[in-house]
Image: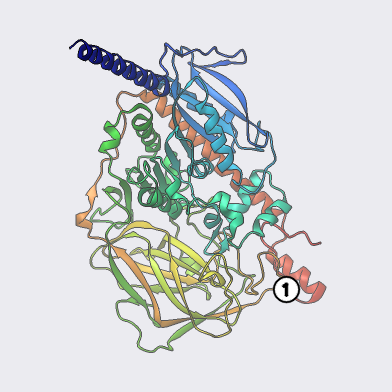
Amino acid sequence: MKRYIQSIILIGIVSISLLTGIYTVIIINNNKTSQEFNWTIPLNASIHGNSYKITYYVKMNDGVKLATDLYVPKDINSSLPVIFIRTPYNKNELEIFSLYVDEDYAIVIQDFRGYFASEGEKTMPFFPESEDGKKSLEWISSQPWCNGKIGTWGPSALAIAQYLLAPNASEELKCQVPIVGTPDVYEAAFRGGALRSELMVPWMVAQGYTIEEINNFVDMEKLDNRWDPVRIVNNYKDIHVPAMHIGGWYDIFTQNTIDAFIGYQTQGGEGAAGNSKLVMGPWTHVGGFGALASGEYKGLPYIYPNQKAGMIIDLGDIVFEKWLKNNSTRWENLPDVIFYLMSSLPYNNNKLGNNWYSSNHWPLETEEQTLFFNNDMSLSTTQEENENSAISYLYDPLNPVPTEGGGNLALKAGTYDQRDLEKRGDVLTFTSETLKEPVTVIGQIKVMLEISTNCTDTDFTVKLTDVFPDNTSMLITDTIIRARNRNSYSTWDFLESEKRYILNITLDSTAYVFTPGHKIRLDISSSNYPRFETNPNTGEPLWQNSTTYVANNTMFMANSKVILPTYDYDKLIPFNPNLSNLNSNKESKEILVTKVNNYFSLIESNYNINYKSYSNKIPSVNQIIKIEEQKVKITQILPLFVKRIKK
């Protein structure tokens, strides 16, 4: 009996010791309570409102030090969750985010390698950000002011940096809020195999890249393993964090944002799969921060109603509350997908669309509606019977179709009237009958073109427009395909003269209601410049051609069609976008929204300035023709932005 009692006592002592040990580990590893908090504010700290600001220089794996600002509450007495932002646009300009210290967060803002106060040299855009981001996460997690929970935030380049650090990130990374970004820099830069001139070149110029460095970037137009550091599309399984993916229907990265959501949600590792959310607004690249116009109609700004500019800040709050503070109420109440369904503003008597809706998945379960291209320039449900029925046009690289709206950065973005462009002989315009019932299109539009050409390579562009009763043709979405890349970005499959080929072209996703009295239109051409770099039709690498050819491009009707992903409007689930947290500091958040909008709008305007000033340094197309004809009696093409350095 005595031995039995001793055994019970021993077991009890061991059990208590184990529980105490486990509890201690939990306290140490997860909470870092104020009893253990032992951190002295450094002497180089400065006061910013209610926070201390301390600048660190964080050493990367190769010894380069990145300038990193920490903001913490002046009365800090315990470790805190961290909001981490990485930027190429000067960390000092984002000091406004120190407002978050009032909500008991530590804020860390870091300059990219080679930018502003950070050491190092600029490499190809974003190539160091995966490694540098992961190393910085490790440094943050080891600091006494970090409680082991880190979330990332930021739009555009700041969002790209988030995506690139996500695979195999340290376990302290708990959540992300990438806004208008891309998980695949290659695909964003070379859409359909064509360089997005107005996006990449002005951006690189604004960041201080030289002409030679821009040429080196363009030389990488073929997808190979050199691009691995800036593509995570094959690594979603290595991501283990939830994310709030936020994009716009007229953003430069519309489809990239959606693809990232699908990748995290359906292919992600434990922690990511099933834990992501997607929000798509009627915005251009900075529209969600308050730049409300999404295009232009008859000279007036095209402003969608109830678009809730600034809700992006609320969405970030919801993410951080859930994953950094374990307050799940608002997160759990959000559907997985929230999207704005656009429609025309004038002539929309039924008031269809132009509001927010939700779903628990993306893409939606749509029905395919097939329309065929006809020789009479109509779009109809009837297919041409004559397999040789065709329309041809001449595409001259020295006289390209100019860009008028779309998902642009340096040019005007959003929906614009295409009628003037549709009058050109190198634009084929196919139009449906006047709609008697609404047609709701949600998702990616697929276009199949049967084509032939007299050149070894050429481009084909596609635009979807809404033709209003006053005949304005308002752009909804568009894309391009470089024929040699029709099978792959990694190989160039050149064309045989006059041989017929099938091109499968997928436009960026949209959500749009075509209302009764309107018409659906598809514009087919071979250029949209400078949104996309012109194809010289020679088959040579970008900017290395010494001449251009005029392509005689033919589109065959019998095997050409468009597939619209349609949805029953009455089955849509409305969503109330009022996400404001009544307990948060409303006045501070309004200030934050305004300043962030002004900041990123200023960056966008700088791209416009660079676009205009840099393009003015390059001879106009007519000057180029005249000069080269005088020299060797042939025409040569030079890109709008950069003339290759001839060795």
Q: Is residue 304 visible?
A: yes
Colour scheme of the picture: rainbow
Task: Please name whichever residue, 120 or 236, is drawn nearer the observer in this view of the structure.
Answer: 236
Task: Please name whichever residue, 298 or 143, is drawn nearer the observer in this view of the structure.
Answer: 143
Task: Please name whichever residue, 146 or 579, is drawn nearer the observer in this view of the structure.
Answer: 146
Q: Is residue 283 visible?
A: no
In the image, residue 630 lies at what x, y percent? 80, 73
Task: Please name whichever residue, 162 or 576, is drawn nearer the observer in this view of the structure.
Answer: 162
Residue 4 image-quadrant placement: top left
> Furthest-left residue in view?
1
Instruction: Determine the secondary structure under disc 1.
Output: loop
Q: Is residue 444 left or right of residue 397?
A: left
Please determine whether, in this image, residue 502 is positioned above or below residue 163.
Answer: below
In the image, residue 466 lies at what x, y percent? 37, 63
Please determine whether, in this image, residue 332 is positioned above or below residue 497.
Answer: above
In the image, residue 136 lies at what x, y percent? 56, 33
Q: Is residue 135 left or right of residue 99?
A: right
Please determine whether, in this image, residue 297 is positioned above or below residue 152.
Answer: below
Q: Which residue corresponds to mark 1?
A: 635
Q: Quadrant of the C terminus?
A: bottom right
**Number of callouts in the render?**
1
Q: Residue at x 60, y 66 (%)?
A: 534
In the image, residue 346 lies at what x, y percent? 32, 55
Q: Quadrant of the N terminus?
A: top left
Q: Residue at x 49, y 57 (%)?
A: 405
Q: Is residue 434 left or right of residue 113?
A: left
Q: Residues within 10 Å of mark 1 (few under 14, many from 20)?
A: some
Please determine whether, in this image, residue 123 is positioned above or below residue 312.
Answer: below
Q: Residue at x 52, y 25 (%)?
A: 142
Q: Residue at x 67, y 60 (%)?
A: 219
What amino acid type should be assigned to the residue bearing mark 1? Thr
